[in-house]
Amino acid sequence: MYPRLVASDEIVWMSTQEAARRLGITTRTLYRFVDEGSLPAYKMGRVFRLKQSDVDAFIEQSRITPGTLEHLYPERKTSRTAEADT
């Protein structure tokens, strides 16, 4: 006999379309994340499935740390710099 899983141990499987929708990305981008090893997926017959817990963990790991995006916006002029320009 196999041990019975309790509700908290149940795996919730998602299709690639469901996972892509949850992440707000295209299935093509999802496949790229899977191929790069960023997001685990499982092949079951001819289809791929993802664990909802893995998708949720991927979302949390993708959180941006405040203060790490300075390279994306131009440097602000300080009042000294503004005075020197005039």
Image: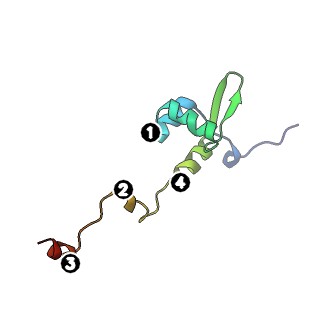
Residue type highlighted by circle 2: Leu
Residue that extends furthest to the left in the rendered view of this protein: 86
Spatial CA span between label 4 and label 1: 14 Å
Farthest residue toward the right?
1
Badge 3 or badge 4: first in the primary sequence: 4
Local packing at callout 1 (Cα closer than 10 Å; few below 14, some 14-19, many 20+) is few
Numbered badge on residue 60: 4
Q: Mark 2 and mark 4: span between their CA atoms?
A: 22 Å
Which is more foreground, mark 2 or mark 4?
2
- Residue wearing tag 3: 80
Lower position in the chain sequence, tag 4 or tag 1: 1
Q: Residue at x 72, y 46 (%)?
A: 6
Secondary structure at badge 4 equals helix
Earlier-in-chain disc, 2 versus 1: 1
Q: Amino acid at mark 4?
A: Glu
Give the residue at mark 1: 24
**Distance of mark 3 from mark 4, alpha carbons?**
40 Å
Q: Quadrant of the C terminus?
A: bottom left
Which residue type carries mark 3? Arg
User: Are the residues tagged 2 and 3 within 8 Å (C-beta)?
Assistant: no
Q: Secondary structure at mark 2?
A: helix
Q: Amino acid at mark 1?
A: Gly
Q: Could you tell me which residue is drawn at 61 percent across and 42 percent down?
A: 39
Q: Position of residue 55 (x, y in %)?
A: 57, 44
Percent across and percent down for residue 16 are 56, 31
Q: Give residue 72's mark.
A: 2
